[in-house]
Image (cartoon, rainbow, N blue to C red):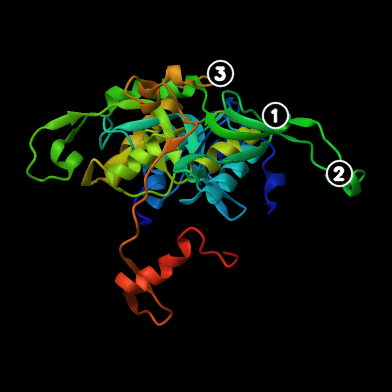
């Protein structure tokens, strides 16, 4: 997937006693844009912002007044203000591990009152267009699909989370709770005895963002404006414009890129999502662990219903616009009540279908007809016909070594 598409214990922790102190110091810093502000002014806890790609971070930093930065765990945290509100921004990279670590460090060092992930995504809903913005009422891990013998796919274990006292999985879809893990005292007999369920060790199928954040972001719809139909469809000859909107929906974490609509259908009939990205689960997991209110704000850059459509710049700007609206209007305390399917926008797939995750979704897989690969010398080879059939032979029933 093109990287431009969408979208350690730190030694500096001792110097970051609390977010309010950091902001006050920033204001007093000689030469800073905010140096003239009264030193005694009280600032609330900052709002955290996480980005994935350079374009996404540029859209946020250009809307910030940055006073200084901190490098923690090799991530650069830009500290400053957005519309007069204290914010901390970090780029975590375009993957779950990076997003998770960058978010966890942000949450535990700066203690934000909420953390927003601002960036771009692809549509997985025919009613969502390039230039729209999807807010993550819910997130699921579409990479956790399990293909079963019998021709159906189901949800496998997506997230295992050990919730600490200050963590929260309010509104999450819980698959089950695991048994208590061993200790040195019972390790030698652990496998031969039964164990009680640990209510703090949960296997999750989905996470829910606070409804207040999703609702607040949805109110920025009027700021989005329009997109030309030529841009929204990738057809230069198309005339007219489409009015863009915000949608409170479900975001699926999956490595996809304008795949065939039949594949979208196979995925979406198991997970009813409206947009996809690469970082949702890592971001959501970190916030659930720390108990930090969170929301993903995803500007739509592309859609498989119009494979030639792609506007990364527009999508990053739209996401940043909604992010700034949330930052500007967020109250000092965020209501943690979670988003439910009933709270999603009427056009959201899960709202229309009546479910977020199916128990089973049956599918058909056609034979592979062509394979290309590149060898160690850089030469490309193509397998078809008998050469491909020889490789496929082992996948016939009864072809194992034991008969």
Asked whether the residues under the numbered discs 3 and 1 touch, taking CB atoms below 8 Å apart as contact, a structural biologist would say: no
Query: In 3D space, how far apart are the residues under numbered discs 3 and 1 (Cα atoms)?
Result: 15 Å
Residue 300 quadrant:
top left
Q: Which residue is found at the position 41% from the left and 21% from the top?
A: 354
* Residue at the spot of label 1: 166
N-terminal of the pair, mark 1 or mark 2, is 1
Q: Nearer the viewer, residue 318 or 195?
A: 195
Query: In 3D space, how far apart are the residues under numbered discs 3 and 2 (Cα atoms)?
Result: 41 Å
Residue 361 in view (yes/no): yes
Q: Which residue is found at the position 67% from the left and 50% from the top?
A: 12
Q: Of all residues shown, which one is farthest toward the right?
A: 185
In the displayed structure, 312 sits above or below 34; it is below
Asked whether the residues under the numbered discs 3 and 2 touch, taking CB atoms below 8 Å apart as contact, a structural biologist would say: no
* Residue at the spot of label 2: 192
In the displayed structure, 313 sits above or below 204; it is below
Where's residue 244, x and y in %? 24, 29
Q: Residues within 10 Å of mark 2 (few under 14, many from 20)?
A: few
Asked whether the residues under the numbered discs 1 and 2 touch, taking CB atoms below 8 Å apart as contact, a structural biologist would say: no
Which mark's residue is nearer the viewer, 1 or 2? 2
Q: What element carries label 3?
A: loop
| Numbered mark located on residue 337 in the image | 3
Where's residue 330, x and y in %? 48, 22
């Amino acid at each position: 997937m093109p990287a431009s598409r969408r979208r350690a214990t730190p030694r500096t922790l001792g110097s970051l006693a609390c977010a309010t102190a950091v902001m006050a110091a920033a204001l007093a810093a000689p030469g800073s844009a905010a140096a003239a502000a009264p030193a005694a002014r009280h600032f609330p806890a900052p709002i955290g912002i996480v980005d994935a790609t350079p374009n996404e971070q540029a859209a946020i930093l250009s809307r910030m007044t940055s006073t200084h930065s901190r490098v923690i765990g090799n991530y650069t945290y830009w500290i400053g203000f957005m519309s007069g509100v204290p914010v901390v921004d970090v780029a975590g990279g375009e993957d779950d591990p990076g997003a998770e670590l960058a978010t966890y460090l942000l949450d535990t060092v700066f203690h934000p009152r909420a953390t927003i992930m601002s960036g771009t995504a692809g549509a997985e809903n025919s009613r969502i267009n390039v230039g729209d913005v999807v807010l993550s009422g819910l997130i699921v891990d579409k990479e956790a699909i399990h293909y079963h013998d019998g021709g159906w796919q189901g949800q496998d274990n997506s997230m295992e989370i050990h919730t600490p006292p200050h963590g929260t999985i309010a509104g999450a879809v819980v698959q089950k709770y695991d048994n208590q893990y061993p200790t040195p005292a019972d390790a030698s007999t652990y496998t031969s005895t039964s164990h009680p369920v640990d209510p703090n060790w949960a296997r999750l199928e989905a996470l829910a963002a606070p409804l207040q954040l999703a609702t607040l972001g949805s109110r920025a719809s009027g700021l989005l404006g329009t997109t030309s139909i030529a841009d929204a469809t990738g057809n230069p000859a198309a005339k007219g414009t489409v009015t863009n909107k915000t949608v409170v929906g479900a975001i699926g974490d999956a490595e996809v890129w304008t795949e065939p609509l039949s594949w979208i259908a196979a995925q979406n009939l198991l997970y009813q999502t409206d947009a996809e990205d690469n970082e949702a689960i890592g971001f959501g997991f970190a916030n659930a662990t720390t108990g930090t209110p969170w929301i993903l704000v995803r500007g739509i850059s592309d859609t498989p219903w119009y494979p030639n459509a792609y506007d990364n710049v527009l999508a990053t700007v739209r996401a940043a616009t909604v992010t700034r609206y949330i930052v500007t209007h967020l109250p000092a305390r965020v209501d943690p009540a979670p988003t439910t399917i009933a709270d999603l926008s009427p056009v959201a797939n899960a709202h229309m279908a009546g479910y977020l995750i199916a128990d089973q979704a049956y599918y058909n897989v056609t034979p592979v007809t062509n394979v290309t690969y590149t060898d160690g010398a850089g030469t490309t080879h193509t397998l078809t016909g008998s050469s491909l059939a020889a490789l496929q032979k082992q996948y016939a029933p009864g072809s194992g070594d034991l008969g």
